[in-house]
Image: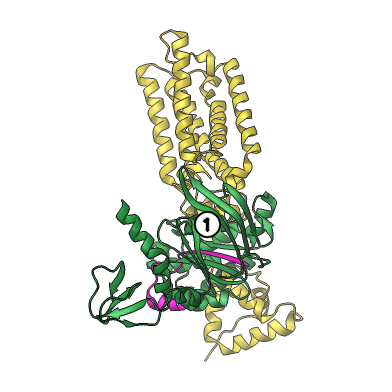
Amino acid sequence: MNVTHIDERLLIGYCELSVTAATASVIEAHLMNCASCRAELANVSTSDLDGLVSQQVVWDGVLERVDQPTRSCTERLLCAMRVPADTAKLLATTPALRLAWLAAVAFVAALAVAAGRMDGDGPWPLLLIAPLLPVAGVATAYGPALDPTYEIGVAAPMSGLRLTLLRTLAVILTTMPLLAVAALVAPGDGWAMFGWVLPSFALVAITLALSTAMSPVRAGVAVGVGWFVALFGLNDRNGAGDFVDRSAIFGPSGQTVVVVVAVIGVAIVAIRKSCFDVMMVMGERR
Amino acid sequence: MSDSTTTADGVRLGGVTKRYGRTVAVDDVTLSIGPGITGLLGPNGAGKTTLLRVMATVLAPDSGNVELLGYSTANAPARELIRRRLGYVPQEPGFHRQFSAFDFVDYVAVLKLINDRRARHDEVRRVLDVVGLTSVMHKRIRQLSGGMRRRVAIAQALLGSPALLVLDEPTAGLDPEQRLRFRDLLSTAANGATVVLSTHQTDDVAALCQRVVVMHGGVIRYDGTPAGLADLAAGRVWLADARDPSAQLAWMTGDGMARHIGEPPPNARLDEPRVEDGYLLLVGASVLHESSCR
């Protein structure tokens, strides 16, 4: 009977963990049924590698390959984008990285673009709505209401601020490109269509700043209400037919104010960063 | 009562008070807990969960000093040092829907800054093995039974063999066999560590704990050994054929006898006190008093 055995070089590669996962699987399947190759593997482990690779190391390698934990699509995608595995695991739980969230953002942005085209409002619907979408993503990224592992996370040594900022970054990197695409197809002229970008950063910064004193969801709602109050206030002051005085918020002077607001938000977060390391009870930082 | 000022390590609370609005959840509690298993008993709303959250560094007290493993929790860098050696099971641990048991414990291990992937995975397998979940570790958590989920929560607390374990009702939802297994694993895990667990199960306290603290209304009502707690009811536990309608603390037992605590009912015989009797004597009457005042 013609019996095939595993080449010694392959066994050495297997011990060195330098073979592919597919090759390792084939080797492991063969080892299960071949005492001769198992003995050869033991020899390789102890002699050819000058004792550098012990059987324990081999077994660890087998465990690591065979017992590989499953990864979610989001985690695999993040790892494919060269995000470190640890960070990918932390980010994969962010609601804003789920398909449902991205679909919702795309849907709302499409509605805003359509409303601008149909009612002749041009860019305004998108400019008004766009800054609130990253805020909604950040408000739902961390906190007792929406993160089931929140309390365990607070008791862990990883900084709460780091986790919050990681998830905030994930929200920005997924939501803003979608909004940018919407801005490109929305009716309007040139760079004015991107007037929502700086307000988005400012509102996110203020949401994080308010999160040092209340739950992120409450902070997000407060920022959303504040955004519309500010816009209607400007509208009243303008007294014109425009829904919003464009020059006030989306023009150069308004954008300068927005940057100042963003800086204030970031400063508050930096000063009160330790607030992210204690738990919120009943919607308040305790 | 045990001396609450001589223990060097573990937990040291000095005049800790915690309020939620007008409600005082924990009222000027001073307590030291050293290595070994300490049980925290008390009725719902006694302040146990708030006190455990303070011990787990997730809540800061409104006033008072909290020192854990020799470090003050008021200091942020020290708090991180404490958290590296802390295991915590909250009262209602949650899980991300998409996670398997392995994924979840691995996720917590990342939060616990166990950065080397190989070492982290080995540690995750170890703790899942300790709680007896190796065979189902790649199953989605939502497919596991309530008892298994509870064990997953316990597994994450054991990551890194913590020096301080804070467990809020860890045996809730476990069947009797699982509770026995839990007692066994906790006895092993507690080797040299400071373990504080809250529970409603007085038999868990009797079986597991060297020390028991009874809380009620945010204050400590008893601090000592389980045997000492049982002794509080010595000479005051009575068995009778029928329940005395005038008795404040009385209930029918499984063998058809009426167990009374306090004054003897007619035709009763004295019985050996249990931990439960001492506990009910401490908090049961006041609970009844509170309900009668409403």
| Residue, disc 1 | B51
Residue B254, how many percent across, how many down? 28, 79
Residue numbers of the magenta segment: B159-183
- Residue at the spot 66% in from the left edge and 68% down from the top edge: B7
Q: Is residue B103 in view?
A: no
- Badge 1 marks a residue whose secondary structure is helix
Nearer to me, B131 or A38 = B131
Residue furthest out toward the bottom:
A1
Q: Which chain is yellow?
A: A
Task: Tell me: B235 left or right of B106.
Answer: left
* Quadrant in which residue B286 is drawn: bottom left
- Residue at the spot 62% in from the left edge and 20% down from the top edge: A256
In which quadrant of the rendered image does the N terminus of chain B lie?
A: bottom right
Residue B6, how many percent across, how many down? 67, 67
Is residue A201 within the magenta segment? no
Nearer to me, A13 or B188 = B188
Is residue B168 within the magenta segment? yes
Q: Which chain is green?
A: B
Nearer to me, A1 or A132 = A132
Residue type, numbered disc 1: Leu
Q: Chain of mark 1?
A: B
* Quadrant in which residue A240 is drawn: top left
Residue B138, how many percent across, how many down? 46, 68
Residue A257, how many percent across, how many down? 60, 20
Nearer to me, A10 or B74 = B74
